[in-house]
Amino acid sequence: MIKNDTWIHQMAAAGLIQPFEPKLVRQIQLEGFAQPRQVISYGLSSYGYDIRLSPAEFRIFRHIPGTVVDPKNFSPDNLEPTALRTDENGSYFILPAHSYGLGVALERIQVPDNISVICIGKSTYARCGIIANLTPAEAGWRGHLTLEFSNSSSADCRIYANEGVVQLLFFEGEPCAISYETRQGKYQDQPEAVTLAKV
Ligand SMILES: Nc1ccn([C@H]2C[C@H](O)[C@@H](COP(=O)(O)OP(=O)(O)OP(=O)(O)O)O2)c(=O)n1
């Protein structure tokens, strides 16, 4: 069964999502500004939680002529760090047209042993041609999710840091025999930095 806002709120106290925002935030009031700034929503929703993109790092995929990407031997040279920019609308990275980029979640999550998390895109970005890869966070996993985005449009697009970027859905099942923690999964305890493919 999918978990609701009451459950997510209760579990936040036990470390499910940190930092935790108990309502859906659509605008923030900045010191020294008369008007609040509109943000891409983040925080608790009815049956999920919208997490933010960290300003720490965003990397864009680039082709290195003469090479083939090997998931068993991934080269960091294929992912070029891109600068965080800031203007009156907020801080953002630019994901060029028809390209692929990796960022990291601002929040740290800690998945209980009887829960599976599905990470899906936000409609606001989907409407701009940005596709967030649909990925799981497994029972017993902890850390900052590495987030993958493709820009399927022919225009460059901003991806805002410190604002909502993907949403998490939480599903409860019978307790599993072996969690991500007990199997010592290789992506356990990811820091707030892009974690590359490993074998
Ligand atoms: N966008 C995502 C999706 C997942 N994860 C983390 C949480 C997952 O619990 C863990 C492993 O995800 P997968 O099971 O999809 O990865 P693999 O099957 O490739 O790796 P493993 O062999 O560790 O299961 O990686 C992540 O950081 N960013």
Image (cartoon, grey):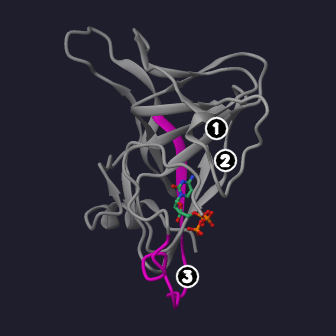
- Establish if 88 lies above or below 177: above
Mark positioned earlier in the residue sequence (2 or 1): 2
* On-image quarter of the N terminus: bottom right
Q: Mark 3 or mark 2, which is nearer to you? A: 2
The magenta segment: 164-185
What residue is shown with label 3?
Answer: 173
Question: Is the residue under label 3 in contact with that under label 1 (CB below 8 Å)?
Answer: no
Residue kind at label 2, given as amino acid type? Asn
Which sits in the foreground, 19 or 2?
19
Question: Is the residue under label 1 in contact with that under label 2 (CB below 8 Å)?
Answer: yes
Residue kind at label 1, given as amino acid type? Phe
What residue is shown with label 2?
Answer: 133
Determine whether the residue tagged by mark 1 lies in a helix, strand or loop: strand
**What residue do we see at 52% from left, 58% from top?**
47
How many callouts does the rendering have?
Answer: 3
* Mark 3 vs mark 2, CA separation in Å: 23 Å
Determine whether the residue tagged by mark 2 lies in a helix, strand or loop: loop
Residue 165 picture location, percent across and down? 52, 38
**What residue do we see at 71% from left, 51% from top?**
70
* Mark 2 vs mark 1, CA separation in Å: 6 Å
